[in-house]
Image (cartoon, grey):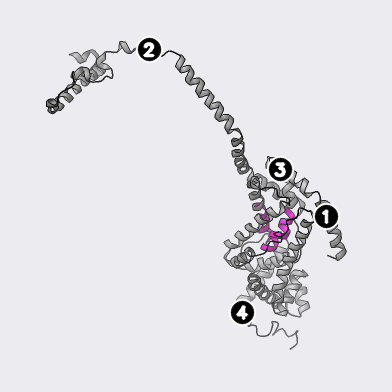
Amino acid sequence: MSEKDETRPLPEGEPAVSAEEQAAASQLADELDQALAGRLMRPSAQQGSLAAALMLRASAAEQHLHPARRSALVDEAIQSAQPRAIAAARPRAARRWAPTLALAASLLLLVGASLMMLVPARKPSSRASIPITLRSRPSDELLGRPFSAEERGAASQRLDLVFADRLAGYRRVVLGEEADR
Amino acid sequence: MSTVEQGREIAECEGAAQEIPSLEDALVRRAQSGDQEALRSLLTRHADALYSRIILPRTGDASAAEDLLRATMVTAIEKLHTFRWQGRSIYFWLRQIAVNKVIDHHRHNQRSSRLAQSLAEEPDPAADAPSRRGPELALIAQEEQRINSARVRAALERLNPRYRRAIELRLLEELPREECARRLEVALGTFDVLFFRAVNAFRRTFGEL
């Protein structure tokens, strides 16, 4: 059979061409033309075939980056990575300065502790001016001596005594002179 | 490329490559110290080789190849502090990053996951090059191109001769569709189908190699 016979253009044994296959073949042909012309391609059903065709072409002969495009990609990469590269570099700088900082902090703590030991403690300034009934205090003075085992059952009475004392102090804080009326 | 041209290229590479250990070592150290100009110089030096020999032949799509090259360089910058000079060009370290990016790219694409597996099993032409001498870089570059071409040839050899011819005319000789159809003595639409089937047959074969 002559190769000019357009009814048998495909290799022997190949199936006949369907309308869908013809459409897909035309789409691949158009997309390949666009790719070879350097135009951006949208993802399509022929993406896999197109990629295979371009890989084949790129493997057969080297295709180089234009120097301007190469420089642009390098600059973009440096800009994208810069914050993270700086963050990655920080621990190294920190590791270099860490011993010095630790020593300085220790010395400061030592000096501060020494100063605190040398300086006399300050006396409370206005504590004496506050009546005892209004100050935070233990209840020993109110309850008196430690109670015996036989007096265990009177716990609720002791609690009532403490509560009344504290409540009286609270009334004076809130009501002032009116609390004694 | 003729034998004479190859020899000239190797001689030029040998001359330039003698300076690689000292010059590139200094660039790497300066880049690791935060010198941006050294970093830019280092990346510019190897960007085109990574693109044309490693990434583009394994992806095909120029746009995707540029994205992968950019991602390769970003990763290299972020991990540069982990690189230790061992007497050979940083190109091999960059190359491995680029290959890994390409493999991840294909793994994310279900249509080319088999290709990803094939790429992962590819031998590394730099694996047996421990020498400190510069000419290895030129030889590695030749080896990369040889591997790329050999993979394509092996896949083409397994195709039907008419399919193979359609691919050779359209992609290797880069002829327009109309000229391809004329040479094969078929209508344009018929050539499109012939080429379409040829590429799909190539995909199946290439992914198995």
Q: Is residue B74 left or right of residue B20?
A: left
Q: Is residue A71 visible?
A: no
Q: Are marks 3 and 4 on the same chain?
A: no
Mark sitting on residue A123: 2
Question: Closer to the N terminus: mark 3 or mark 1?
Answer: 1
Question: Closer to the N terminus: mark 2 or mark 4?
Answer: 4
Q: Position of residue A36 (x, y in %)?
A: 73, 64
Image point (82%, 51%), residue name:
B16
The reply to whether callout 3 and callout 1 are in contact (CB within 8 Å) is no
The reply to whether callout 2 and callout 4 are in contact (CB within 8 Å) is no
Q: What segment carries the magenta color?
A: B47-70
Report how far apart the C-alphas of labels 3 and 4 lie in the structure: 62 Å
Image point (72%, 66%), residue name:
B147
Q: Residues within 10 Å of mark 3 (few under 14, many from 20)?
A: some
Kind of residue sitting beneath label 3 = Arg
Kind of residue sitting beneath label 1 = Glu
Image point (71%, 51%), residue name:
B90
